[in-house]
Amino acid sequence: QTGELGLTQTMKNISGKPLAFCLWDRTLCQGGGFAFFPLKKNSRFKAGWSIRKTANGKFVYDGTKHSSPKVKILDGVLVAEATGESTKIGADSDAGWIAYARGKVLFVKYYPYFERGNYSDGGNSVELYWDERVAELEPLSPEDRLGPGNSYSFPEKWTLIPLTEEVTTHEQARALVGRIPSFEF
């Protein structure tokens, strides 16, 4: 009835040796909407975000020489129109949420951010992939070193917020930031 869902992902080391992993949540949404999240003021990336490229057969995140016609930075918030050529971007956002507006619905995923965490996929705490069909909203946990038998959990809260009109521009999506309730873990 509230449009809210709480969930927790847990990993457990069932091996006999210490291991280090992160939890990486991918939620697939129908493409064609607008995804957005605040950028970290003191980001490790020159522009506050990065784009995934292939170099020497491996994926790397470029935080210096990147651009996308689908991405705009509006008052410290990255807004991406999630349609078109296959693209993946990331950021070390400390806001603890990513949102997606499509049709008359705003979907918000909250997750904890750890300032001293070791974010292993290019240093990103949040990533976004899109193509013609889908948009993937991807919060990441920091890497955790687990001894044999130990567990690590990463909570999220998802919420749906009804909108009175469809979002059709980057600027309309940016304006929705004020509608996102604050939440902390």
Image: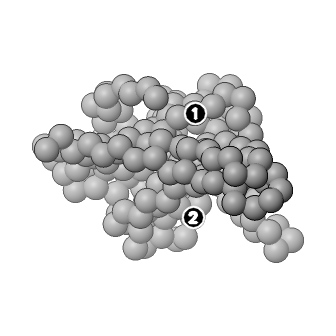
Please name the residue that numbered disc 1 is placed on.
113
Q: Which residue is at 69% across, 55% downward?
A: 13
Residue placed most toward the observer, 104 or 154: 154
User: How far across and how far down the image is residue 3, in percent?
Assistant: 21, 45
**Residue in the image at 63% along x and 47% along y:** 151
Numbered disc total = 2
- Answer with left or right where residue 61 lies relative to residue 157: right
Nearest to N terminus: mark 1 or mark 2: 2
Q: Is residue 113 left or right of residue 119?
A: left
User: Residue 95 location in percent, x, y?
Assistant: 51, 31
The way the protein has been coloured in the rendering is: one colour
> Which element carries disc 1, helix, strand or loop?
loop
Residue at position x 50%, y 51% from top? 9
Q: Nearer the viewer, residue 3 or 79?
A: 3
Looking at the image, the residue that sits furthest to the right is 56
The one of 69 and 152 positioned closer to us in this rendering: 152
Question: Residue 58 versus residue 24: which sits nearer the camera?
Answer: 24
Residue 87, labelled with which disc? 2
Q: Amino acid at mark 2?
A: Thr
Q: Residues within 10 Å of mark 2 (few under 14, many from 20)?
A: some
**Could one spot residue 170 in this view of the protein?**
no
Amino acid on which disc 1 is placed: Tyr
Q: Secondary structure at mark 2?
A: strand
CB of mark 1 within 8 Å of CB of mark 2?
no
Q: CA distance from mark 1 to mark 2?
A: 24 Å
Residue 135: image quadrant is bottom left
Residue 8 higher or lower than 87, as above or below: above
Q: Is residue 94 left or right of residue 33?
A: right
Where is 179 relative to 106, above or below?
above
Mark number, residue 57: none
